[in-house]
Each structure stands twice: as structure tokens, then as C-alpha cells.
Amino acid sequence: MKINSEGVSASRVYLPAEKNCSTLLDFFVSSFPHIEADEWVARFAEGLVITPEGRVVSASDAYLPSTHLLYFRRLAREPEIPFEEHILFQDEHILVADKPHFLPVTPSGLYLHQTLLNRLKKKTGIQTLSPIHRIDRDTAGLVVFSINPGERAQYQNLFRDRVVQKIYEAIAPYSDELAQRLPLTYRSRLKESAHFLQMEEVAGEVNADTYIELIEVMKPWAKYRLMPGSGKKHQLRCHLNALGVPIQYDQIYPVLTPYQEYDLDFLKPLQLLAKEICFKDPITGQERAFRSQKELGVVFNAHE
């Protein structure tokens, strides 16, 4: 696996024999139509396309059928996330990190270097790190990484088989009506809405359930404990919104607000925290239990 100085892994591409291209640039432009030709020219010029042995190739080099090349992503401008992650635990099998708000777990969209995965690779020097589950970039808290590729599937299966206990905390409006019903397990069927960023509740067989209880009240806000029994996209955000108490500073529910990617409001993080995670380690047999050091109390005192 090739890694650049920023801890970013290269992508691997095969150059098939039947492809009719005269130069390497022709191949990349035709194979990745969503990327402008000028972008590929810039990548070649910056030495971001290489052979598996690490030799830099040029855009004008002749096409190399039946071979592999490696290439790195390039971002002209990437939003800077001014918050630091913390490693809470590390052994030879797993690493547990405490992620700040706003930081994506893995590279996507505008984010390449400013991701939890690449920061940890650079900090630890462990290039085989891979997250065994995900949380939204807007959410803070615990993320577990596998260290050894051969063990990764066994850890991922814990989440597939729903034998991991996850506990979240959230700040949302206080509701007398809802408080009288808590604790409760809220169940519904979730699917992607017409706008891919949002999920919505629909009729049909239940596929998402969340146990909800009240932790603390400071009107007009309250702190809730959430225990998802399933792992649907935006499940916790959807369920609290459906109960009439959308999470504080949620830019997706109930109303989708356009993200200001280069002008993020760091004073208004989504008030959702992956607080605890517990599971039996499939490799060592140990009972694992981790707790985030972060608290939602700072914005909890804000009255809006």
C-alpha cells in the first residue's frame, strides 16, 4: 500500500489490454469522466500518478496495457477542521478514537487530509487502520478501528449481527408530553427520501428502533440518552425529529439547510455524541467497554 507524506492512501487502477488509448492521460480522462482533464493534468504534474514500484509517470507517457497504476486524490482547497481527535485505547488489534464534531471519519467529497482516518494514520504510522463502523461527520464521539486486515471482518460482523451496545447522548428541546412517555422504544420504517441527504419515515415493516430516556432537563432544552437497536442512516436524528424534538443545531432535520463547506459555524455543532460502546472482542474474548471523554454541556446551556 502506497502512502503519501500526509498519510493518504493511493487508489489502484487496472489498465486493460482492450482499452484503445494512446497516452496515460487519455486513459484517465476516459475512465473517470466525472473528473476534468485539467485535474488529471495537474495530478500528473504534481507526481500523484505512479507505478506500483513508486516511479512517477507522465501524462504524455504511452498507454501501458495489462498493468496497474496508483494515483492520489488532489484537493485545491480543503476545509480546515480546528479540533483534535484523541486516542482513548490502542493494542495490537484495535484502536479507539474520540472524534470531534465536524471531522469526517474517511475521505469523501471535499475532505481528504482532514479526516479521522488519515489523521490517525499520520499520528500512529499504522497504515492498515480501518474503521469497523461509521458515525456522521457532524457527530462527535467514539469510533473503533481495526489494525490488522485479517481480523477486520470479525470486528465488522459484530455490528452486522447487532451484538454491540452503543449509547449516544443528544441535546434537544424539552417536551412535557414526550417526558411523560419516556423511557420508550421508538420504532419505524426509514428509507432515503427524494433528497439523498435526508431519510424519511414510511409505512411498512419496522427496520429501525431506538430506546430513548431522559437524562437531564434544563428548559427549554433536555439531554436524552439514545440506544439504537439498528443502524440505519440518520436513525437517531430521524427518530427524535419524529417525536417533535429535533437535535439542537441539526442542519438536516427537520429542515435541510445548505452546508457552508468553507464557512462552517464551529460554535454550533450538532448536539449528538457517541458516548459509550461495549462488545465482546471476537479475537481476544475480552469484554470491551469504552466511554467518550467529551460532554455536550457547553452548548447545553445555550438558550435560543
Image: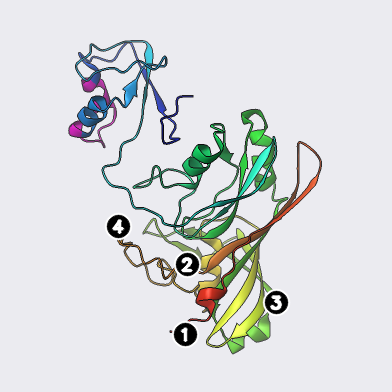
Please give the residue where the numbered disc 4 appears in the rendered image.
Answer: 262
Q: Is residue 174 above or below residue 29?
A: below
Query: What kind of residue is marked 1?
Result: His
Q: Which residues are magenta?
A: 25-38
Please give the residue where the numbered disc 2 appears in the rendered image.
Answer: 270
Kindly identify which numbered label has been placed on residue 101: none
- Res 168 → quadrant: bottom right
Query: What kind of residue is marked 4?
Result: Tyr
Helix, strand or loop: magenta stretch: helix
- Is residue 186 on the magenta stretch? no
The image shows residue 141 at horizontal and vertical percentages of 58, 58
| SS for dot 2 | loop
Mark nearer the N terminus (3 vs 4)? 3
Which numbered mark, 1 or 3, is in the foreground of this view?
1
Residue in the foreground of this view, choosing between 152 and 128: 128
Q: CA distance from mark 3 to mark 4?
A: 40 Å
| SS for dot 3 | loop
